[in-house]
Amino acid sequence: MTINVGDKIPAATLKTMGSDGPEEITTEDLFKGKTVALFAVPGAFTPTCSAKHLPGYVANAEALKAKGVDTIACLSVNDAFVMGAWGKDQNAGGKVQMLADGNADLTRQLGLDLDASGHGMGVRSKRYSMIVEDGAIKVLNQEPPGAFEISSAEAMLRQL
């Protein structure tokens, strides 16, 4: 069952790449008392994700923060090493927090998992974005398979 607007983000532990290696961050630490622009992608270094999705949030980070966003976070079912390398490749440092949901624990709890086994990619995340205020979902933009429109940074800016 897919999570809906008004629902609370479930408890989960994610990973992010720190200066000394992978570090844990809980959903409570990520969302409590903050407005978070979270977007998820099917995979780091994949074509649409690298050419459009993440770059849009990097380019619009200041505009999103000017509209009240405390944290911009990118989530993918990849490991922290891959997410860290992708963030460096895309110059996301200081703008977008790169979050690894390596086992798809949070992604499955949200009901936003995608079976990409037919493409040799296993379980991944659907492409979506959401605005989360103090742990509650205020806006949820879930893309149909193969699409990239409503989860973009530009679309999110219009919703704030």
Image: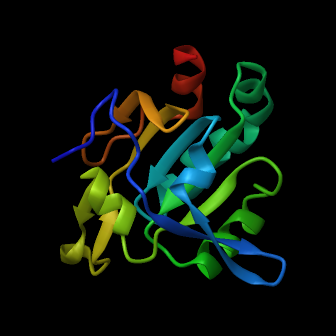
Which residue: 81% across, 57% down? 93
Residue 151 visible within the image:
no
Question: Which of the pair 43/52 is nearer the observer?
Answer: 43
Judged left or right of residue 122, residue 15 is right
Judged left or right of residue 94, residue 6 is left
Which residue: 62% across, 53% down? 29
Which quadrant of the view contains residue 23?
bottom right
Q: Position of residue 33 (x, y in %)?
A: 64, 35
Q: Taking 152 as reference, is 46 above or below it?
A: below
Question: Which of the pair 54/66 is nearer the observer?
Answer: 66
Judged left or right of residue 156, residue 144 is left
Q: State the quadrant of the C terminus.
A: top right
Which quadrant of the view contains residue 68?
top right
Q: Number of marks in the image? A: 0
Judged left or right of residue 132, residue 65 is right
Q: Taking 108 as reference, is 82 above or below it?
A: below
Q: Position of residue 156 (x, y in %)?
A: 54, 26
Q: Taking 129 as reference, is 109 above or below it?
A: below
Q: Taking 51 as reference, is 63 above or below it?
A: above
Colouring style: rainbow
Q: Position of residue 85 (x, y in %)?
A: 70, 75
Question: Which of the pair 148/101 is nearer the observer?
Answer: 101
Which residue: 25% across, 47% down? 145
Residue 82 visible within the image:
yes
